[in-house]
Image (cartoon, rainbow, N blue to C red):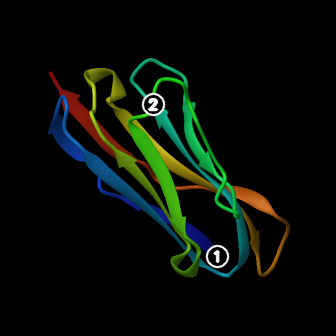
Amino acid sequence: QVQLVESGGGLVQAGGSLRLSCAASGSIFSINAMDWYRQAPGKQRELVATITSGGSTNYADSVKGRFTISRDNAKNTVYLQMNNLKPEDTAVYYCNADLDPTRGPRGRYWGQGTQVTVSS
């Protein structure tokens, strides 16, 4: 069974920083792309950042220059460094992994989410 667990959320003032982590565990053969999404109250879930297995990255325009996605393949972990946070970054942040389990087909797995609140 595969599990993704996020950590690192919290309350921060505008202009501050947070670092989110998401560790994948269980019966994993390989992990392909890993993503961070977020969902604010009353809004649709949106893609924030993506990193491929080779380290290529892509960001939503709203976070470019402020957020950095990275990964540690040895630890099956993806990170999101968030700097210069703004109140509009307030949301539940979810990690998502496109992975091959040791048994069963390739698929996308979600974490449970971690709350990020930015006060003005």
Identify the image quadrant of residue 115. top left
Q: Secondary structure at mark 2?
A: loop
Q: In the figure, 47 relative to 4: above or below?
A: above
Q: In the figure, 76 relative to 33: above or below?
A: below
Q: Secondary structure at mark 1?
A: loop
Which residue is located at x 40 percent, y 60 percent?
A: 21
Q: Is residue 96 left or right of residue 33?
A: left
Which residue is located at x 55 percent, y 68 percent?
A: 3
Instruction: Please tell me which residue lies in front, 78 or 102.
Output: 78
| Residue designated by label 1 | 1
- Residue 101 location in percent, x, y? 75, 74
| Residue designated by label 2 | 63
Are there few (<14), some (14-19), or many (20+) residues within 10 Å of tag 1?
A: few
What is the distance, in whole Å, between disc 2 and disc 1 at their CAs? 33 Å
Q: Quadrant of the C terminus?
A: top left
Amino acid at circle 2: Val
Which residue is located at x 37 percent, y 50 percent?
A: 81
Discs 2/1, front: 2
Q: Quadrant of the N terminus?
A: bottom right
- Residue 89 location in percent, x, y? 35, 28
Which residue is located at x 50 percent, y 58 percent?
A: 70
Whether residue 9 appears in this view of the structure is no
Q: Is residue 8 left or right of residue 65?
A: left
Furthest residue in direction right, as rendered: 105
Amino acid at circle 1: Gln
